[in-house]
Amino acid sequence: MPQLSPRITQLNEGGSDGWEVFYRARAMVAAGTDVTELTIGEHDIRTAPAILDAMHEAAHGGHTGYAMVPGIPALRAALAQRLTERTGVPTTAENILVTPGGQAGLFSAHMAVLDPGDAALYVDPYYATYPGTIRAASGRAVPVQTRARDAFLPDPAAVSEAAAESGAKSLLINTPNNPTGTIYPQATLEALAEVCRDRDLWLISDEVYDTQLWEGAHLSPRTLPGMAERTMVIGSMSKSHAMTGSRIGWIVAPAPAIERLIDLATATTYGVPGYIQDAALFALTRGPDLEERIAAPFRRRRALALEVIARQDTVTAIPSQGAMYLMLDIRATGLSGRDFADRLLDAHHIAVMPGESFGRSAAGHVRVALTVDDARLDAALGTLCAFAESLTHE
Ligand code: PMP
């Protein structure tokens, strides 16, 4: 065959995409092994029947043709209202583009702000798709390292330095954070906003976990002075409404940026199916009660997990305030996160994600997704801790 573009062959820098343990666990499950899967950020419940009914009705009602590319007006209006209420930043339908999931939003936002070869900053550890997303948009992916002892929060001075060195056009942040479970404090966000203003960066703010808050509050950096005009917020129904498979999310941005993003959507996705948008609108009109009900199991399991971790001192947890994950420091075992995860899977049929899958900064850590029932999680974490302890005697 003729050559493929380096853009696509180098999407993951020709190396691994960091998901081998996940795929290995899935293969074991397919072969009949009972694996406790604490890997992927997927709820252990399915989309609520009432939302599926709304989808079914919309489809049978005829909403199966091409939907309007920017999103149906009622959904854009509802999202604008929700954002205005939750953030206090006046937001209209012209600030919203409905996208097929947050992932499409992340890609589109980078396409909108990067020319080929432009540097784009992101914080390490990061959600696994970030560097590939930037490269897919022909950008140069530049990670900013963080430290476990800072709970992996970005140091604004390091971000500023990286921006100056690379000539970056954008900074991508994620709070509440996957994989660390931290929520960026206001002071960090203010300092990062200052860096963006000083260095004339776009801030791409991934807020897909903004309904999973266990401690403290979520602050959208779009609310900070001078930031609405240089921030693109990525939102999604995936986590908030257990609608991962429906592929529905949005970008919030200045209206002139949304106009251009609509051009991009016209040239790529051509919008999101109308019946999915109708179902999303229905789900949003259920209000925060439904969101809280979907978040509740993770809130409960995080508390339970912290209790298990507190009973021993080989494994420690990065202080977490949100999202459906816990990042565990296993450096006392002397193993890398990858080796630990491999050995845990082989010895105990428990699958966790190696910290290294999320970047260099999280080496010697593993990420646990709080996505199995309480009893199973309790047992798995107990086993994980005992296994870590046994390794310290090797
Ligand atoms: N951002 C983060 C941090 C995520 O964890 C995910 C999904 N795991 C996404 C974006 C993408 O979500 P979706 O495309 O399903 O909206």
Image (spheres, helix red, strand yellow):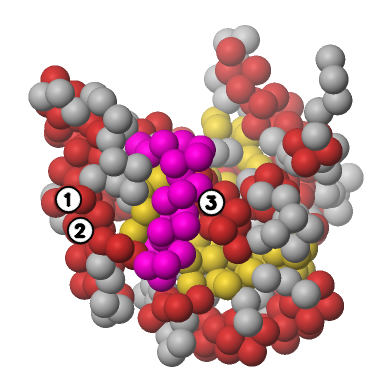
Q: What element carries label 1?
A: helix
Q: Quadrant of residue 125?
A: bottom right
Range covered by the magenta-colored residues: 248-272
**Mark 1 and mark 3: Cα distance apart in space:** 22 Å
Residue on which disc 3 sits: 108
**Mark 2 and mark 1: Cα distance apart in space:** 5 Å
Where residue 171 appears, as percent x and y from the top left, is 63, 70
The residue type indicated by label 1 comes to: Ala
For marks 3 and 2, the one nearer the N-term is: 2
For marks 1 and 3, the one nearer the N-term is: 1
Residue on which disc 1 sits: 74
The residue type indicated by label 3 comes to: Ser
44 left or right, relative to 48: right
Viewer-side residue, 143 vs 145? 143
1 and 3 marks in contact (CB < 8 Å)? no
Q: Quadrant of residue 319?
A: bottom right
Where residue 236 appears, as percent x and y from the top left, is 38, 50
The residue type indicated by label 2 comes to: Ala
Q: Residue 77 carries which label?
A: 2
Pick out the residue farthest to the top. Answer: 31
Say if 393 sits above or below 372 in the image: below
83 left or right, relative to 303: left
2 and 1 marks in contact (CB < 8 Å)? yes
